[in-house]
Image: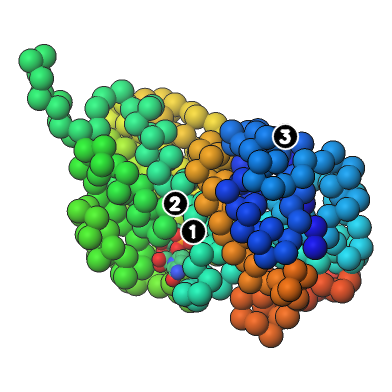
Amino acid sequence: MKVGVIKENAPGERRVALVPEAVPRLTKAGLEVLVEAGAGDGAWFPDSAYSEAGATIVKTTDLFATADVILTVTRPDDSQIARLRPGQTVFGMLAPLIDPQLAATLASKHVTAVSLDGLPRTLSRAQGMDALTSQANVAGYKAVLVAAAVYGRFFPLLITAAGTARPAKLLVLGTGVAGLQAIGTARRLGAQVSGYDVRPASKGEVESLGATFIELTSVASAAGEGGYARELTEDERAAQQAELTNHIARQDVVITTAQVPGRRPPLLITEDAVKSMAAGSVIVDMGASPLGGNVAGSEPGETVVTENGVTIVGAQDLPSTVPTASSSAYSRNISALLLHMSSEGTLAIDTSDEIQAGVVVTHDGEVVHPAVAKLLGSDREGAR
Ligand code: NAD
């Protein structure tokens, strides 16, 4: 089986799906690795490193013409989709619940789609394949560095001959994978850190990192299924925003990471809360998206300064700004999944396996993932 690594085409994307270190692991399992020329350049992995590791560097046309399996980080673009052939398989973070139309297109081309973001994350044998976690870790780390770079003071307590600087007060809203990494990173930089989440289980995790957990009296537990949060009701959301505002007003830096699977990110910091912050404060909104983020006024990919002097960074694509680390981790995730789904050097699609049932989106010309098929079905219903 020939496994092809494509050069990512999305604007600003610097990651690569497979790094040279992973090549021997795949070749030992009987797979042949092809790499599109320049695929690793953005993450500082030159073609020569892939060749030395046992891969063959090929032109774009040859890669799409000969690979049985294509490895990618994000969704292939239209020109890449046009090159896909029936019987090929694409592995990547294809976000089929956000973009089910891609699944419909790949199914109609008889391309098998395997999406790492569908992995059952609580399964311990799947942890090495969990790309959402590995990329969220990188994003949480980088969000703190972005905040520190924008902030006009020090994070740590500094006592110098020129005076004493108090430590920055930093609050992390949403303490899942990215939030916990942000807390750890901010603590290492010396900030005074607190965290808040709607899942009560996260209290112990926040405190184990040496940060203070903020408990709100107005919102009950909102733990949902599979370790995720559920969406808050209208009343809960208003109460949460009002109570959070008191805490936010006292912060120098706030980092927001709150997400609810399949829903738009919840608004946690209202316009009033932003207005309550002192000039020079910084907010990094990791939930910023075209649908709106965790922070009123945040723009995805943009940095805005409010009239009262608060800098709001709409953080987007943070993992691709730390491309070597995020690619290395992603490469381990994708090769573990590929090897799990391979047998004697060929791909063995079997959706009776719990891991495969989560990640296989299309196969044999059909959208086989029930949640994605349901979304497409309801689209068709809506069109009637
Ligand atoms: P996520 O990216 O979906 O959300 C980030 C955080 O935002 C979550 O902690 C969520 O509770 C929080 N949130 C959502 N709405 C909120 C609101 N209105 N106010 C405040 N916070 C809000 O989550 P994630 O980081 O992918 O992880 C979620 C959970 O899954 C965690 O419990 C994590 O430990 C767990 N997880 C477990 C495994 C495993 O068992 N191997 C792997 C990955 C994640």
Q: Residue at x 25, y 66 (%)?
A: 204
Q: Could you give the CA–CA distance between mark 2 and mark 3, rounded to whole angstroms? A: 26 Å
State the residue in front, 340 or 362.
340
Q: Name the residue under label 2.
A: 137
Q: Name the residue under label 3.
A: 38
Q: Does the beta carbon at disc 1 come under 8 Å from ligand 1?
A: yes
Tell me, yes or no, whether the two marked residues, 2 and 3, touch with CB atoms within 8 Å: no
Q: Which residue is drawn at 61% across and 76% down?
A: 355
Tell me, yes or no, whether the two marked residues, 3 and 1, touch with CB atoms within 8 Å: no
Tell me, yes or no, whether the two marked residues, 2 and 1, touch with CB atoms within 8 Å: yes
Percent position of residue 337, x then y: 62, 66
State the residue in front, 49 or 167.
49
Q: Earlier in the sequence, mark 2 or mark 3?
A: 3
Q: Measured along the vertical axis of the image, is residue 336 above or below residue 281? A: below
Residue type beneath disc 1: Thr
Q: Name the outermost residue toward the top.
A: 162
Residue type beneath disc 2: Asn
Locate the C terminus and report the quarter of the image it occupies.
bottom right
Q: Residues within 10 Å of mark 2 (few under 14, many from 20)?
A: many
Instruction: Report the disc number at residue 133.
Output: 1
Q: Which residue is drawn at 49% across and 68% down?
A: 127
Residue 307 in view, yes or no? yes
Q: How crowded is mark 3: few (under 14 residues within 10 Å), some or many (20 or more)?
A: some
Of badges 3 and 1, nearer the viewer stands: 3
Left/right of residue 202 with respect to residue 343 in the rendered view: left
Tell me the quarter of the picture where residue 301 sits.
top right
Left/right of residue 244 with respect to residue 236 in the rendered view: left
Residue type beneath disc 3: Gly
Q: Which of marks 3 and 1 is nearer the N terminus?
A: 3
Tell me the quarter of the picture where residue 338 sits.
bottom right
